[in-house]
Amino acid sequence: MPSTFHTRIPELMMASGPCSVYPQVLRAMGQQMVHHRTDNFVELLLSISGDLSELFHTKNRVLPVEGESILGLEMAAYNLVRPGDVCINLATGYYGSGYQKVLRGWGGDVVNVETPYNTSFTIGQVRDLLDAHPDAKVLAFVHSETPSASENPLREICEECHRRGVFTIVDSVSGVGGSPLEFDDWGCDVVVTGTQKCLGASPGLSLVALSDRAWQRIDENDWRYDRSYLSFKPWHGWLERDYVPYTPSISLLYGLKAALDIIDDEGRQNVIDRHMRSARACRAGIRGMGLDLWVDRDENMANSVTAVTVPDGIDDIALRGMLDDEYGLHISGGLGQEAGRLMRIGHMGYTATLEKVLTALSCLGSAMTRMGHPVDMTQGFAAASEAYAAPLSE
């Protein structure tokens, strides 16, 4: 029997990801198929590859793997972790904590270390952990932890691990494109991002950057099945012969190319700056409205999403439902132990603009006032606008 899908799509998606995507991306994804064994497709993929290498700042190709970004993170552990390897896992939130199970599932002897979920690790803490575990082979962490809206010091951690010969696995699903990344210069080994966050495209692809020494370890990998979908080894065919190992998600690649063209036209650093300004504006607006931010200090806050502490007396599920139903705006609640304690406003890719931040603040403030928690909208708007316009060096 036929069924009916009753659409209930928000006009503006400013969740923790995916967010509303660029209109150009939507149009590009509607193009007709090309076959993945033709010169047309090779040309498309080489163009995407060059754009991604520039985005990550690496001389190596970045793998566009068919599957949401959690797949790329699973692949990283499958390929780099030998059974019995000591693996340090830094947990600053829901996703960071969850990755310990992935490392342990592939045989890692996991040292899981958590911070409170409203702060980040310092490089001093990381050095102490590495000193305490000199036999560590892998250190894993989340760069931009969207469930708690915090950000770890990517550069300092990767440089320190590289100096000590420890492989790094970095979940930068909501970091790449919104925060600085110099993959080669900072000594990163594996960085995984998704298409659905700061790149402003649709979910469904894992973008995986690997260092030369990571590839060497993968080549030496005789402890895993080479032809598993989780293995990076089949991708050598693409690296060497422009021949992808599986049937790719062609429509998603059309959309990714359109998103990368937008970044190229605007300028990589300009896009990062826009994310920084949008995050700063959102934080300033929230404070100006008289609300509290979840993360302890500005330097620990992510560029991709802002977490707002739920005020006493407010039911965040009811509030977010009102935003969906009556304002056409979707934002996220907390995950795991943070459920009911915070709300998250995503400002990534297409939604990382002052206009959309002000729209989100306006809707949030109006809904909260209706629920009996009035806020200072005038001060919030003024603070957000001033913060967006101020020089980034401040």
Image (spheres, rainbow, N blue to C red):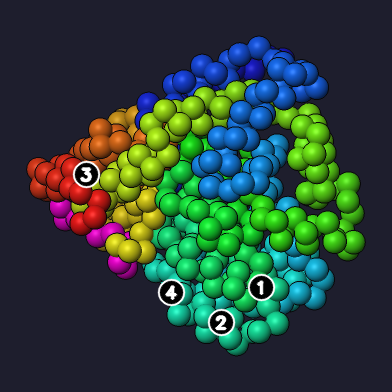
How far is the residue under mark 1 from the one under mark 4? 20 Å
Asked whether the viewer can see residue 96, the reply is no
- Looking at the image, tell me whether mark 1 or mark 4 is earlier in sequence order: 4
**Is residue 368 placed above or below 221 in the rendered structure?**
above
- Looking at the image, tell me whether mark 2 or mark 1 is earlier in sequence order: 2
How far is the residue under mark 3 from the one under mark 2? 37 Å
Q: Dots 2 and 1: beta carbons under 8 Å?
A: no
Where does residue 39 sit, x and y in percent of width and height? 75, 19
For this orientation, the residue located farthest to the left is 378
Where does residue 314 sit, x and y in percent of width and height? 28, 53
Where does residue 211 sit, x and y in percent of width and height? 66, 55
How far is the residue under mark 4 from the one under mark 3? 27 Å
How far is the residue under mark 2 from the one under mark 4? 11 Å
SS label for mark 4: loop
- Circle 2 or circle 1, nearest the eye: 1
Label 1 neighbourhood size at 10 Å, few (<14), some (14-19), many (20+)? few
Quarter the N terminus occupies: top right
Mark 1 — residue? 165
- Circle 3 or circle 1, nearest the eye: 1
Residue 129: image tag:
2
Residue occupying the point 78% across, 18% down: 38
Mark 3 — residue? 388
Q: Of the residues shown, which amino acid type is indicated by label 2? A: Leu
Q: Of the residues shown, which amino acid type is indicated by label 4? A: Thr
SS label for mark 2: helix
Where are the magenta residues, as a range?
A: 285-297
Please say whether residue 382 is one of the residues in the magenta stretch: no
- Looking at the image, tell me whether mark 2 or mark 4 is earlier in sequence order: 4
Q: Of the residues shown, which amino acid type is indicated by label 1? A: Gly
Residue occupying the point 42% across, 46% down: 178
